Image (tube, rainbow, N blue to C red):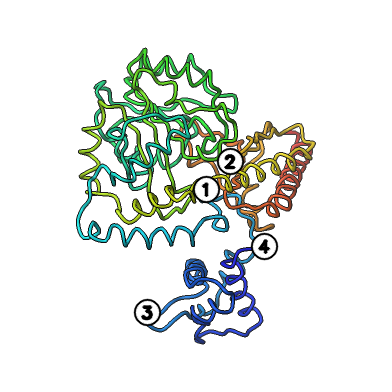
Amino acid sequence: MSKYNDIVNYIISEVENKNLKYKQKLPTVRMLSEKFDCSKATVVRAYAELEKEHVVYSIPQSGYYLVENNDELNRSVHTDIINFSSAAPDKGILPYEEFQHCLNKAIDIYKQTLFDYSDSKGLPNLISVLRGEFQEYQIFCREENVFITSGSQQAINILFNMPFPNGKNNVLVEQPTYNGALKSLEFSSDRIIGIQRSFKGINLDELERRFANCNIKCFYTIPRFHNPLGTSYSGEEKKQILKLAEKYDVYIIEDDYLADLEIKSNSYPMYYDDISSRVIYLKSFSKILLPGLRIAAVVLPKILTNVFKEYKKWADLSTSVLSQGALEIYIKSGMFKAHVKKIRKTYSERMNLVKKELAQANMPYLKCHVPDTGFFACIELIENVNVSNIIKELRYSSNIYLEDVEKNYLKDYFNDNILKISIARANSENIKSGIPIILDKISKIKEEKSFYNDVFNI
């Protein structure tokens, strides 16, 4: 267990044992730093987490204090919560201390730049470093085609709102898809059109009909480790989608948000096979580093660079120089590669454990869809069982948190038979104890439904 978790658990334990009380000043950062033999930054991070969960509050120039009548202590922070709902990365494996070192170095290196606006395109040194790093993903590009944005959400917002050379106005999205993309389109003047993506993939004939008849300017897709299905397109599917995009003059926005978790050596992004400059490649660093970093990179076809730069400039003038500089240093130091290796192993092991636990189920009314790695696995209920009820009962009876997939759908496409399991923040112990409880709850609800149907001849 990390020092950060040790400190959080120590504070909770002291409160439960009534050694810390309301209005009493909590141990100082210095005291805890010495007690746990760690950096002050680790202590501050631990207190920040407790503050976020409304366990403590801070008074400037004074210190930290316990929140009165704290109900959150026994819920959000306590270790009996099993979180299968979050798409945010596991805080326990994120490189806080290493990245703080890079931030400090970035302040020294870029201190003059911090007083001025930087190039809206991005920090040239980071772009240069990323161009080399992208070769690891089989993304070969020129520096002039790479842009840095304030997270992938900003890039999505810009792309959905800017005009494309094909003069078309509609955006095609998979159903289901990342809810941030759907939310972005709510504020766009473009019309949103859906196409079903199932656990078996996408219907290419239907895709061709959409491209041919629906005035599609771009197709937003998550080819691997799909959110929320967890599935990936095959190499052949990617090539067929590219052929159709070229044939019908459609651009593709490839959201490769979890590229770093890929364990197959022969799995390449769509960008790799793009010979007609149709693919816009989008890579986030928030899911594998720090969510608050808010840095993403976009690789654009040359024909789109000028208009994207103009829209980016007036979206935020420039992305944080400090964050960009820290990421540059982090990658150049070799720490990024080491971290990627660690999380790739971690999430692969977790997903294998999910697969093992779900394999214990002997329930003909459900199918389990578990990838080799990634954040998401799904249980598909073949017979009509109310998924929302399952989610509610698990939360209130077992402290297991799951998230409904309704927000990932357009209204006309909603599929109410999918139970999404996110392992982004669920460790091995959570998986071992939580999955059997989920399966047991599904079984009991199914039995109750069958009994009700038999009694009332439904």
Identity of the amino acid at label 3?
Pro
Circle 2/circle 4 CB separation < 8 Å: no
Amino acid at the residue labelled 1: Ala
In the displayed structure, does residue 275 sit left or right of residue 334?
Answer: left
Label 2 – label 3 distance at C-alpha: 40 Å
- For residue 60, the mark is 3
Which of marks 1 and 3 precedes in the sequence? Answer: 3
Q: Position of residue 105 (x, y in %)?
A: 37, 60
Secondary structure category for the residue under label 4: loop
Q: Are marks 2 and 1 in contact (CB under 8 Å)?
A: yes
Q: Secondary structure at mark 2?
A: strand
Mark 4: few/some/many CA within 10 Å (<14, 14-19, 20+): few
| Location of residue 305 (image quadrant) | top left
Cα separation, mark 4 vs mark 3, equals: 32 Å
Please, which residue is most extreme toward the bottom here? 24
**What residue would you read off at disc 2?**
376
Sequence order check, earlier mark of 2 and 4: 4
Q: Amino acid at mark 2?
A: Phe
Q: Which mark is residue 80?
A: 4
Which residue is found at the position 48% from the left and 48% from the top?
A: 334
For the residues labelled 3 and 1, the Cα–Cα distance comes to 32 Å
Which label sits in the foreground, 3 or 1? 3
Q: Which residue is mark 1?
A: 87
